Amino acid sequence: MVPTALIETASRPYRAAGRFAWHFASAKLRHDPFFAHILAHGLIPDGARILDLGSGQGLLAAWLIGAHAWHRDSAERAWPARWPAPPAPRSLHGIDLTRRDVDRARIALKEHEARIRFVCDDIRVAPFPQADVVVACDVLHYVDADAQEAVLRRVRSSLAPDGVLLLRVSDCTAGWRAALDRAVDFGVQVARSGRTSGLTCRSESQWLALLDALRFRVTRVPMGRGSHEANRLLIARPAR
């Protein structure tokens, strides 16, 4: 179980960005299993250069910064016993198309702007810096199939040889769970940006085939219950 105090520490900076930003951060960090999973399994190494595609209001950065600070201050009494120490990223470069979310991220994480940067741009055309970790959580289904492949091809080029892509996608063959997942994502899209573009979904096997064609070796992880039960975390590393 994720300690409540850790969630509060990571979401607290969003108070400066407004009530919506703070409540959204608190709820997302509490209920989305992705955030706990990356810490519990040490998926991001210490000192990593992170590229966060579809970074939203910067929750990944806030989570890592909050976890590192809280571990430093509270590790002996409260850090989950089986979790490794959280990483301290060397840098994080976030890209998101929604100006309001980018503004919220910049406000909340202003004191870390020397190493945490957010740009408002389209991941289909935005430059990708070299990275040790690329995170694409619930973002590729907002672009069409050709763009999905093109983005992943550029991710492959930007990754360090020993880097990792953390790609969370929805398996469109997961029945009502996939339909629920799409409805949730559509609603979040409308609430955050006002956009109502369609979603381009693939089956798990199609995602795996695409990553294989791009020379990734992949570990597949189911990702939660309820509205998250159709989700898959694909941990993809460049094949040598």
Image (tube, helix red, strand yellow):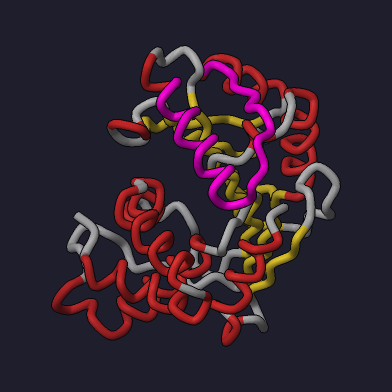
Q: Residue at x 35, y 63 (%)?
A: 26
Q: Is residue 48 above or below residue 162?
A: below
Q: Percent position (x, y) of residue 139?
A: 61, 41
**Looking at the image, is 2 positioned above or below residue 239?**
below
Q: Measuring from the top left, give residue 12's x and y in whole percent.
A: 38, 77
Where on the picture, by quarter, is residue 90? bottom right
Q: Position of residue 174 (x, y in %)?
A: 41, 16
Residue drawn where x is 20% and y is 63% of the image: 80
Q: Is residue 21 magenta?
A: no
At horizontal 55% and vertical 70% (from top left) the residue drawn is: 89
Residue 63 quadrant: bottom left
On the image, the x and y values in percent for residue 58 come to: 56, 64
From the viewer's side, name the closer residue of 181 and 229.
181
Which quadrant: the C terminus?
top right
Farthest-out residue, left: 77
Examine the rendered structure and indicate whether residue 176 appears above or below residue 3.
Answer: above
The residue drawn where x is 65% and y is 81% is: 113
Q: Main secondary structure of the magenta part?
A: helix
Is 223 on the left-hand or right-hand side of 171? left
- Start-end of magenta stretch: 179-203
**Is 231 positioned to the left or the right of 161 in the image?**
left
Quadrant location of the N terminus in the rendered image: bottom left
Nearer to me, 190 or 180: 190
Instruction: Confirm whether the magenta stretch covers residue 182.
Output: yes
Query: Camera-side residue: 148 or 13?
Result: 13
Count of numbered marks: 0
